[in-house]
Image: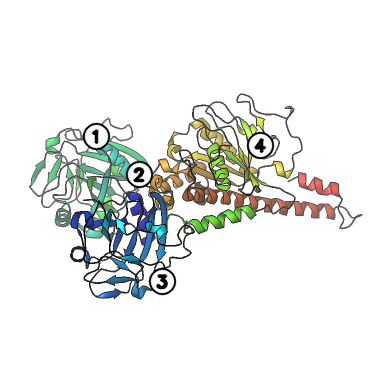
Amino acid sequence: MAGKLTESDFDQLEQWIGSGPKTFTLLYSITRDGCDATTFHQKCDSQGPTVTVLYNPQGSVYGGYAGESWNQSGYVDDKTAFLYQLKFSGTVRKTKFPVVSSTQGLYCSATYGPTFGGGHNLYTFSNTVTLSNGVFPLNGCVRFHDSFYQMAGVSSKVSSWPDINNDTMNVSELEVYKVAETQMAGKLNDSDMDQLEQWIGSGPKTFTLLYSITRDGCDATTFHQKCDAQGPTVTVLYNPQGSVYGGYAGESWKQSGNYTDDKDAFLYQLKFSGTDRKTKFPVVSSGHGLCCKVAYGPTFGGGHNLYTFSNTVTLSNGVFPLNGCVRFGDSCYQMTGVSSKVSSWPDINNDTMNVSELEVYKVADGQRKMVLPKPWTRTPELNEKFLREVTEEMENMSPVIETLNAYRILLLGPVGSGKSSFCNTVTSVFRGRITQRAICGSGDRSTTTLYQPYNIRTKKGADLKMLICDTRGLEDNTGIGPIDVNFLVDGHVPDMYEFNPEIPIDISDPEFQLKPDLSQKVHCVAFTLDAASLDDIPSNVMAKIRDFRKICTRKQIPQAILLTKIDTVDKTVDESVKQVYYSSKIYDVVQKASKLIGLPENHVLPVKNYNREMILDDDVNILALLALRQLAYFAEDHLENVQMKQSRSVRRLQTANPITGNRTGPGDLESASETI
């Protein structure tokens, strides 16, 4: 029985618990095992950390985490315990109530179910409770106070227990899960697992590390102890030159001394000398698919195509010089003609059997949890309090140059990348409702045709001192180009100008602004990219983006990347946007975008735009505000540089005007400003 907790709930609990990925194993369920204190203790005592989850008929989900084992001896000092809320009346409401007096963190009695705090903050039940009218009317109680757990002031939506449990102790289910550290993850990254998963077929797969020569030693006996009778496995070799290759075994390894018929086996290459090169070499003679000998490590094909090692290999000068061999031929695996880049084993393994690592993973059906042990970038705790703080900061921001009314931030990106949706998302955050000021759509041609600055109005009716400027989307063989962008960033293109997709704007255009002031110039540029489509950007569009980068860099205009549609990259993030900084898939995309555009990773800002939602979500709002705030910071940095240049120009004018001394006329100041 798997239990009722969802992946999103596991992710949130894992984040609250901290210290890396966790596995959750169901120990006790009142619908399966009965609501009985004796049974609870039989199944849950001395199990180490556990999480207790209560579900009520109103759709609320809440409970407590115990960092110490349950027993039957009274109060237990638990410095890592906490209470929590995951849902209220069916709506996601994630709140953590940390322990403040750990000496009475848990209460352990032979006749009590899971109980937290002195008094008690959460006392689930005692003795035996019988199902009645479809619910278990728990006979415990709850207390809302801060003596043992900080409950008041943590969330504006929770001021008493009725805001957590709907003022009822009736539950439809109570579960207790054992919480344990996830095993060593291995070197194989998520992108490689995705590729192997695709080659293997038949749906999502989990990869569990069974054997690693750097951890377990390069020894055939140890390999068989850890990997025999485990079902399908994948063997991965990594060499010092940066090549990654290996083989998939659809049948179990064993020590029969014979070949194993394996119709699903294949050899593969993932990287060559550090560069992605993904090639599959399918089995063609399955009767010799695997060679299973007592003294052999993983071995594929008769003869053999890939024979890793025998007996024991010792680490030497930082590498394992494997004593096996390789054979390039088609008798067992089709190796020739599969790839124009591979004509022999040196094109796979750099003509060496030296490896820095060899791993064997158990492959099973199931959805992988792609989470990192700690966030890939340092962030504050993303909660309601932080949202209020960032909102207030944004509402109070103003340009360092006092005569300037607003920062001007320009969005550039391919058609369908989410520029207009980001404008709507940002205006939604501050209006307190879903807005649709920018027209959005899908298709090969840009829905946006104008240079459209959007002001950002708050619920109080005041405007933020920044403009988000939408533009026509970048198209393959038409649309805006380097000439348009050059004039855009310099302020020559007027607001609401309609671009001609065939002809760039020029100085003869009657709307061309000959002498733009600083307020019309762009102070920061954000390249908007679809996180799921980085590999699909047309080469002509990428060439345009690189040209735009050169233009902005030459003019010393700061740039960033808005990475949109992150929810389409990782199912975990789709379920809980807050997991974005723990998602290895998102980090992979951040790194790819950084390399693609040539900007540092901390200039890549992941966001999820509103597109299917009817009401606002705090986590979506926080990501949008973090991105907008960083763009405003970059714009402010640019204006400080402009201000410094203006001051230097004024000083030069004063030095060159000996008659007026330190006095500079208004015309001189205007001239100095125009040169920037």
Amino acid at circle 4: Leu
Q: CA distance from mark 2 to mark 4?
A: 38 Å
Number of the front mark, 3 or 2? 3
Amino acid at circle 1: Met
- Mark sitting earlier along the chain (4/1): 1
Label 2: which residue? 191
Q: Is residue 265 left or right of residue 142?
A: left
Amino acid at circle 3: Val
- Do callouts 4 and 1 mark residues in contact (Cβ within 8 Å)? no
Q: CA distance from mark 1 to mark 2?
A: 23 Å
Q: Residues within 10 Å of mark 4 (few under 14, many from 20)?
A: many
Number of the front mark, 1 or 2? 2
- Mark sitting earlier along the chain (2/4): 2
Is 13 situated above or below 628? below
- Mark sitting earlier along the chain (3/1): 3
- Mark sitting earlier along the chain (3/2): 3
Number of the front mark, 3 or 1? 3
